[in-house]
Structures are given as C-alpha cells and as structure tokens.
Image: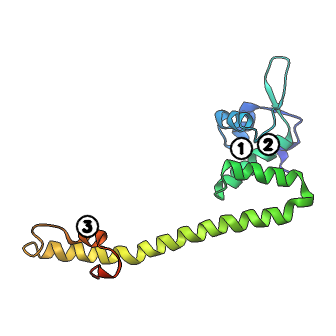
C-alpha cells in the first residue's frame, strides 16, 4: 500500500491533492453513491480512510479504461460480492470490448472511404470547369451504395 495511505484519515482537500481529483469530483462520487459517505469531525469536515481513497483511485482508473459511472457502480457491487465476481466481470469486460471493436470497425471504414473523398475533392479543385456547379463529394455521399462513384 502507498506510504501516504498509512495515515489514519485525511480531509477532502488532502485526498484531492493525493489522488489528483477535484474536491467537487470527490463530492460528486459521494452524492452519486459511488463512494460511501465518510465519517465527519465534530466540525463537519469529511474524513477519508484508506478504503475510500482506494475506491477513488479505482473510479479514476476505471474511467480511464472507458467505464461509465453505472458500470463502475456495478464493478463495485461485484467487488463487494466476490462469490459472483469473475463471471460477471468477464461479461462486463466482454461487452466493453465488443463496443470498442465496433468503434474500431467504424473508424476503419471511415479510414477506407475518406481518402477517396479527398481524392475527389483534389480532382475537382484541379478541374474547376468540370465541377463548376457542385462539388462531387456531397453528391457521392448522398448516392446510395453501389451507384456511388469510386474515386
């Protein structure tokens, strides 16, 4: 465990500094139920223990991996009920991977089609008399499937 986590408790500003999160983000995670409400001092200051700080770091990392707050909430639920964990986590990750692969396929399709559109634009700009009334690219985009002109 990290050295700073050995302290018994930290106030919200200290936690924000240690995790790189804003105080508002920490409060948001708390009000949205991702983070349990921390203990408070007699003066009303929030006091965070190592467990809450680890949860905040988990939330941060999960968001960096593309998980939504609802998915993170689900991951926490799984983490706290380990007897169901592996299968459920596997299913969540498989779903996330499927979404990522769909996005990659969409980007690859765009990567395949955009160079042709760019070539059409360059050709049209080199031959302004041939394409005086319109640009060929919007017309090609609106023409469905196989009827579309290939660059």
- To which residue does mark 3 refer? 138
- Give the x, y percent position of residue 63: 66, 52
The spot of residue 124 in percent (x, y) is 17, 74
- What residue is disc 1 on? 19
User: Would you call the spot at circle 1 few (<14 residues within 10 Å), some (14-19), or many (20 or more)?
Assistant: some
Work out whether mark 1 precedes mark 3 in sequence or the reverse, and give the earlier one: 1
How much space separates mark 1 and mark 2, taking CA atoms? 8 Å
Query: Height in image: 80 above or below 108?
Result: above
Q: CA distance from mark 1 to mark 3?
A: 48 Å
- Identify the element where label 3 is drawn: helix
> Measuring 72% from the left and 49% from the top, which residue is drawn there?
59
Side of 100 where 147 appears, left or right: left
Number of marks: 3
| Residue 34 in which image quadrant | top right
In the image, what residue occupies the spot 65% across and 33% down? 24
Q: Answer with the quarter of the image where residue 94 lies.
A: bottom right
* Placement of 81 over or under 111, stated as above or below: above
The colour scheme is rainbow
Task: State the residue at coordinates (85%, 65%).
Answer: 86
State which tag comes first along the sequence, 1 or 2.
Answer: 1
Residue 38 percent across, percent down from the top left: 82, 32
Which one is nearer the viewer's eye here, 57 or 99?
Answer: 99
Please report contact status of discs 1 and 2: CB closer than 8 Å, yes or no: yes
Q: Position of residue 58 (x, y in %)?
A: 76, 51
Residues tagged 3 and 2 counted as in contact (Cβ below 8 A):
no
Element assignment for label 2:
helix
């Amino acid at each position: 465990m990290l050295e700073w986590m050995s302290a018994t408790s930290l106030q919200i500003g200290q936690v924000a500094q240690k995790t790189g999160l804003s105080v508002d983000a920490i409060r948001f995670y708390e009000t949205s139920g991702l983070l349990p409400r921390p203990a408070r001092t007699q003066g009303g200051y929030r006091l965070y223990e190592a467990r809450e700080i680890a949860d905040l770091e988990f939330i941060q990392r999960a968001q960096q991996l593309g998980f939504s707050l609802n998915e993170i909430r689900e991951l926490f639920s799984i983490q706290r009920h380990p007897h169901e964990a592996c299968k459920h986590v596997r299913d969540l990750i498989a779903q996330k991977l499927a979404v990522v692969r769909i996005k990659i396929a969409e980007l690859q399709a765009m990567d395949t089609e955009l160079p042709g559109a760019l070539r059409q634009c360059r050709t049209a700009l080199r031959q302004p008399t041939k394409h005086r009334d319109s640009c060929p690219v919007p017309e090609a985009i609106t023409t469905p499937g196989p009827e579309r002109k290939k660059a």
